[in-house]
Image: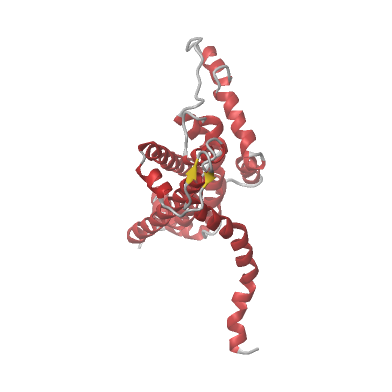
Amino acid sequence: MSAKALDKTPFLMTAPGVIFFIMLLGVPMLMTFLLSLHSYDFTTGIQPDWTISNYIEVLGDPYFHKIFGRTFGLALLVTVICVLIGVPEAYVLAHLPNPWRSVFLLVVLGPLLISVVVRTLGWALFFGGKGVLTMIASGLGFGEEPVSLMFTFTGMTIALVHVLVPFMVISVWASLQKIDPQSEDAALTLGASKLTVLYRITLPQVMPGILSGSIIVFALTASAFATPAIIGGRRMKVVATAAYDEYLSTLNWPLGAAIAVILLVVNIVIIVSYNKLVERRFAKVFE
């Protein structure tokens, strides 16, 4: 086989996947972007003109500023909590003996087998004014007044952490499986404390898992729809529910498309910046 033919092999092998990706994701995204460049009239519908007025409206309206701020604030908070819960959880799971390791790993990942809508409805029953939370508060003597976390930022945070923490555990677990146990044993043999081994040996090797898990959790939270729509409702709108309302309530599809495009762009910018920042910081600390 000639060298020229060998050079084409990677492209030929990846071509089906690239074409499938473009058709499944690239074309709808392009259509959404083109739709966002049209204006809308409440009497005649989508206009055939080309304009950036939808982007000017979203970027200049304090109403949308508040929604975007809430969305990315929620994404940041959920990501931090998932890191604080998921990293120790994955570390403990990795050091459990069999068969307990397999049992507890199944317990942690089991919620992924259940629809996110079903899990969120379960939290709605728990958070409701006459739900389990109110009964527990009454049983503990905190009064007979209903205790509800529905339509609150706290309720959305708890529900999203429950939904997304398994993704953090999976990412960190995958990194922990690549660590050579002999490196930790060697450090302990040379007199390092367990805390030093954890900080100087384990943490740097687990950072790729923490980074990838954080990106996954942040992106999924920022674009989440079902959980914020059910728990947050119209009182605690996020970007996804705002775009949904523009599409189906006011029928202003161009404005909804502009909101979706801005969400995607901001999400990409934050994730890429975070990736570079973390890699640069830990490269200096652990080199």
Which residue is pictured at 49% across the width and 27% down the height? 151
For the view shown, which residue lies furthest in the left direction?
Answer: 284
Which residue is pictured at 35% across the width and 37% down the height? 62
Q: Position of residue 186 (x, y in %)?
A: 45, 59
Task: From the viewer's side, name the closer residue of 14 and 253.
Answer: 253
Q: Quadrant of residue 268?
A: bottom left
For the view shown, which residue lies furthest in the front direction?
Answer: 44
- The answer to whether any part of residue 20 appears in the image is yes
User: Where 95 falls versus 157 (above or below)?
Assistant: below
Q: Quadrant of residue 116?
A: top right
- The answer to whether any part of residue 87 appears in the image is no
Total marks shown come to 0
Q: Position of residue 47 (x, y in %)?
A: 51, 49
User: Where 20 falls versus 268 (above or below)?
Assistant: below
Task: From the viewer's side, name the closer residue of 16 and 133.
Answer: 16
Instruction: Give the position of the C terminus as an image quadrant.
Output: bottom left
Which residue is pictured at 58% across the width and 19% down the height? 131
Instruction: Give the position of the N terminus as an image quadrant.
Output: bottom right
Q: Position of residue 55 (x, y in %)?
A: 41, 48
Q: Position of residue 235 (x, y in %)?
A: 47, 28
Task: From the viewer's side, name the closer residue of 86 and 34.
Answer: 34
User: Where 209 falls versus 132 (above or below)?
Assistant: below
State how the image is colored. Answer: secondary structure
Q: Is residue 255 left or right of residue 16?
A: left
User: Where 125 falls versus 247 (above or below)?
Assistant: above
